[in-house]
Image (tube, grey):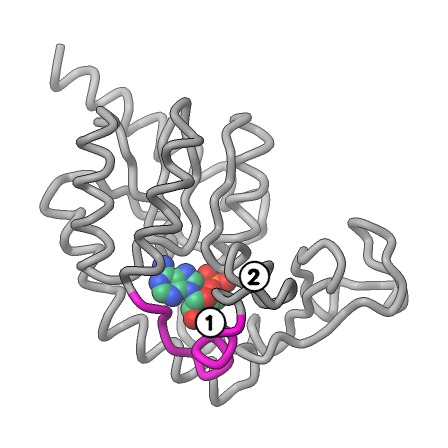
Amino acid sequence: MRLILFGSPGVGKGTQAKILSSTLKIPHISTGDILREAVKNQTPLGIKAKKIMDAGELVSDDIMIGIIRDKLQECTDGFILDGFPRTLTQAVAFDHLTDELGFKDVIVVNLYGDEEKIVSRLTNRRACKQCQNIFNYFDIKDLTACPNCGAVNSFYLRNDDTESVIRHRLTVFVSTTKPVLDHYEKKKKVVHVNGIASVEEVTKNILCSINEKIKNHVKISA
Ligand code: AMP
């Protein structure tokens, strides 16, 4: 299965991508995580990307397309893309790449949600320095240890999760990333799922929508 998890920052793409990746046993490709790892390791890419990410801007299309080209070649049996494509240029390049590789069955899951709820989610989330997992501040009962990897005193607020940067990221999403959804709507590849519900409910709804889409596709092409 090949999925693009689409949606604004903070709508739950990363959380859902991790769950779906382990449920469906297909790799999760998060461009944000790839960039954060590069920043942590201070690679030339990381040094270049840090300022852009901290300001809530987008890293250049050329760099992102290069990263995804390499990754897709490693994931021939399926993938869950989280955070890519984020511009029309990236979407067109992705379509060419998937055509070249013979991947015809890409489904775009559009997670949507109310903007104010998303701002509140993002300002209240904390990431673990060690495993990069993200938690809601109010859900972490033991503020000293990460529930995922056990790292001590490892929570931090991402530089791009401060309120002013979040509002800017949401503006960039509407102006630059939203057109990607229209592009895939025209190709009839999109299913829509409300991202503002419990994690379990959103996962269940994503799986139902994907199954429905696959069933209809088989019906149409049968
Ligand atoms: P994310 O964790 O997906 O919200 O990504 C964090 C940041 O990484 C974004 O705000 C961008 O600065 C950068 N980024 C991630 N994916 C992309 C992409 N496909 N195109 C451009 N920049 C990206």
Is 51 magenta? The answer is yes
Q: Mark 1 near mark 2, Cβ–Cβ under 8 Å? A: yes
Name the residue located 23 percent from the left edge and 38 percent from the top edge. Answer: 97
Name the residue located 60 percent from the left edge and 32 percent from the top edge. Answer: 22
Quadrant assignment, res 39: bottom right
In what quadrant of the picture does the C terminus appear? top left
- Residue stretch rendered in magenta on the structure: 47-60
- Tag 2's secondary structure? helix
Q: Position of residue 80 (x, y in %)?
A: 43, 39
Other-residue count near label 2 (Cα within 10 Å), few / some / many at <14 / 14–19 / ≥20: some
Q: Position of residue 69 (x, y in %)?
A: 33, 43
Quadrant assignment, res 174: bottom left
Q: Position of residue 194 (x, y in %)?
A: 40, 53
Residue receiving disc 2: 38
Q: Is mark 1 within 8 Å of ligand 1?
A: yes
Amino acid on which disc 2 is placed:
Ala
In the image, residue 26 above or below residue 95: above
Q: Position of residue 6 (x, y in %)?
A: 35, 53
Residue receiving disc 1: 49
In the image, residue 152 above or below residue 166: above
